[in-house]
Structure formats: structure tokens, C-alpha cells
Image (cartoon, rainbow, N blue to C red):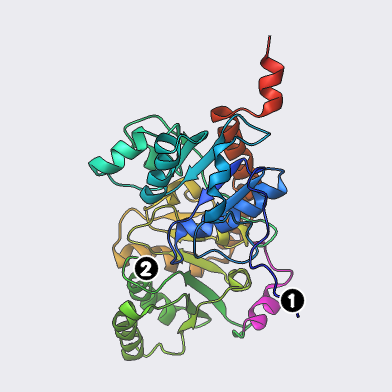
Amino acid sequence: MAHQSTHETVDARRIEVIAPNFKRRLSGVTTTIVQLVPAQRADGLEIAALGPGLPRHLPKLRYRDLWRLRRPPQARAQRVWHARRNTEMVGGLVLRDVLRMPLKLVFTSASQRHHQPFSRWLISRMDYVVSTSRKTAGYLERPSTVILHGIDLARFRPPGEKFAAKRAVGLDPNRKIVGCFGRVRRQKGTDLFVSALVEPLRANPDWIAIVAGRTTEKHTGYAAELRARIEGEGLSDRILFVGEHTDIERWYQALDLFIAPQRWEGFGLTPLEAMASGVPVIATNVGAFPELIIEGKTGIVLPDLEPSTMQEAASRLMKDDGMRAAMSSAALAHVAAHFSVAREVAELRAVYDAVSPPAETRAGNAP
């Protein structure tokens, strides 16, 4: 059997936008690129990723094809280099300012802290800056366009029937389920979730809790301590660690309530994924969470990181079926109206067109 190419073949001369990914390990930035690039290509944009750690189905530009970028694509006066990390901004500057390639540099910032001098200098050299939230924009020293992430609403959607959805992932279909999804580590607040759920689970015997996510070697001790605490509380059969899953959308469909307990987050897609699945959300006040959730309507944004505060919110929603049902309906409508990946794709295309107008636009403006 002939060997097949590991990535979709792209013609470098046609590429209008390059999405560099200079980090081999999976991260939120990588996830964003993996989700967006296929949707952008489906929208008719000639875009390709560049770098390691990318799945096979993604259209990818090879490093050895970079010399072809000396000439602009047919569709635009300059290609757009869309960086999301410092290293990628550096790469774009080398290509544009040292090798004199016809590039426009766009940077998306998700950071919610004051930038170091080198980062500020890099950002100052960009042609256009995008922020992933209003909070992020507040940390920048130059104007930016806020474009909130969207999600694939065809993938994340409510189940046809909740009982069957629970049974499909091997959970008790007669139990109500509260979940926390993400890597098991202190930053993600897994311990806050466990602490907050001890008393509500005792008071509500028809509920169980699940933690879905990977535990890396560095955090195995942390996870072991959590399991020991759960066993000490007599809740080993009520708080379950179910591991990492590539079909995580099926696990959202099994939930009745979702908690995002992070101590820190750059953006955070999990509340959107839960709400798109018809699940109300309790979330800490970090990342973009306050900009994703309508307080009291699609979920609850907690004012602090105290386990007792999370516990009170969880108790309230676990006991009130009517409130959860109302929040579920509101969450579905809210995400459908404002957080589709199609909306994000359209807003990014507007950025690319502003920084490097398409050929037909330039022709139309010619005297």
C-alpha cells in the first residue's frame, strides 16, 4: 500500500493566511488553530498551518516552502501571518523585516496580565492586534479588536435523550450528574470542585460528580491526594475520575450541571461547550467566563474562589430542577446567537481583509 501524505497538500503560492504553531505540546492555542483552520478553509479562505504538533487532517505549509512566500498570493497584496505566541511574532518579524517578504502581521492575545517589555515591543511591531476578551484588551498598550472564540455547534449540542446519553458513556442513567472537565491540576481548580461537592453530594443522594481530563506525570501526586481525600469522605463511588476523552461532547451531553472551577484561565472554552450542550454552568470569575455567561440566566459566575461559595451555588442548582431547566434553554439560545465558530471565522476574515484587502476590493477602489 502506498504511503499517504500525513497532511493535506497545499500550494504555498495560493496561501493567503498562515497560522504558525511553534509549540509541539498540546495547548489552548493549538486547540484554537485545529478548530479554526478547517472552518476558515470551508469558508473559502486559503489558509494553512505551519509547525509541529498538528493533526494529520490539518492543511499544513512545510518549512521548505517558506521561500515561496517571497511573492504575494494572487488574492492579496500581502499574506497574513497570524501569530498567537511570542515565538510566532518573532518568526513573522524575521520573514517581514529581515527577509523582506510581503507579509502583514496579526497577533491574537489571550493573556490577562501585564506584558513583559519584550512582549510589549513585539506587539508594537504587529500590523493588527486581536484580543480574545475585553479583559484581555485591557492589558494591552495599543488598540485591539475583541473577537471572542466560538465553538462547533454541530459537535456540541444537546442529546436526543438524556437517559440514553448517560448510559452511552457508562454512567448510571438514573443519577443526575455534575461535571468538571479539564486537566487535573491546581490551576484548573480540581481540588476546589472536590471540596465544593462533598456536602451537596451528601445532601443529594440522587447526584454523582465526574472529573474528565488528563493527569500529567507532574501532577500525579496532586491527583493522588484528591483521590485519598474523596476516599476519606466516603465518596469514592460518588466523585468519579473518568480520564481524558477525545469524544468529550458525549460526556457533556450526559451532564445536568457543569462547574468550571479554574483559578486562572486565558479564555476557557468549557463553559461554552457545556452551554451549547444544554447544560447550565457555575464558573469562577477568571478568563473570559464573565463575558460568556449571563449571570443568573445561563449560569452563575462566582465572586471569589472560596469552596464555600462554589458549594452554595452547586447546592442551589442541584436542588432546583426548574432553575436548571430554565438556564439550559437560555444557555442554548445564548450560545447559538453569539458563539458559533462561523461568527468567529467571519470576524477574523474582516480583520484579514482590513489589514490586507483582497484583490477584488483593491480593483474596485482603483480610479
Q: Is residue 147 left or right of residue 343?
A: left
- Residue 81 % position (x, y): 51, 42
Residue 350 drawn at (x, y percent): 60, 33
The residue that label 2 is drawn on is 311
- Residue at numbered disc 1: 2
Tell me the quarter of the image containing the C terminus.
top right
Residue 57: image quadrant is: bottom right
Q: Nearer the viewer, residue 116 or 332?
A: 116
Tag 2 secondary structure: helix
Vertical placement of 236 versus 216: above or below?
A: below
Q: Is residue 330 visible?
A: no
Residue for point 60% across, 29% down? 77
- The residue depicted at 62 percent of the width and 66 percent of the height is 56
Q: Quadrant of the N terminus?
A: bottom right
> What numbered label is drawn on residue 71?
none
Left or right: 211, with 173 as reference point: left
Q: Distance between the Cα atoms at labels 1 and 2?
A: 57 Å
